[in-house]
Image: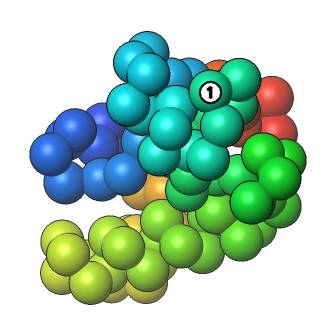
Amino acid sequence: MVSWRPPRSELPNVGIKHHSARSRLAARALDNKYCVHCTDVKGNLKPYEAVLENLQAFAIRNMGVSETEALKMAQEGMSKLPAWEKIQ
């Protein structure tokens, strides 16, 4: 089993609660609980599968891993984030 934790400088803050006004603004609203990558323009969480696919594609493109490995990494990483820890 791969233990994966995304480096902050490489991956978007998918599903991570905001800690600064600047990151909340990036998520389109100051009262939005989650980042722009996990929410739609109204601040609602995007479907799990859509966020998972985007994170998988990011890992393939930027880390050079296989689709299978990228999917595994994305699932494991998302399971540790507040928005997605109870989903899977």
Residue 34 placement: quadrant: top right
Picture coordinates of residue 22, whole percent (x, y): 38, 31
Residue 3 placement: quadrant: top left
Secondary structure under tag 1 reads loop
The number of numbered badges drawn on the structure is 1
Residue tagged 1? 30
Looking at the image, is 31 positioned above or below residue 5? above
Picture coordinates of residue 45, whole percent (x, y): 80, 48
In the picture, measured across the screen, residue 10 lies left or right of residue 73, that is left
Picture coordinates of residue 60, whole percent (x, y): 31, 80
Picture coordinates of residue 70, whole percent (x, y): 40, 70
- Residue type (three-letter) at the residue carrying disc 1: Leu
Badge 1: few (under 14), some or many (20 or more) residues near its Cα, within 10 Å?
some
Task: Give the camera-side residue of 32 and 65.
Answer: 32
| Residue displayed at 37% across by 51% down | 12
In the picture, measured across the screen, residue 33 lies left or right of residue 22, that is right
| Residue displayed at 64% across by 63% down | 51
In the picture, measured across the screen, residue 31 lies left or right of residue 74, that is right
- Name the outermost residue toward the top: 19
Which quadrant holds the N terminus?
A: top left
Task: Give the camera-side residue of 47 and 72.
Answer: 47
Q: Is residue 18 among what the camera can see?
A: yes
Q: How is the image coloured?
A: rainbow
Q: Is residue 2 among what the camera can see?
A: no
| Residue displayed at 18% across by 71% down | 63
Looking at the image, is 68 positioned above or below residue 28? below
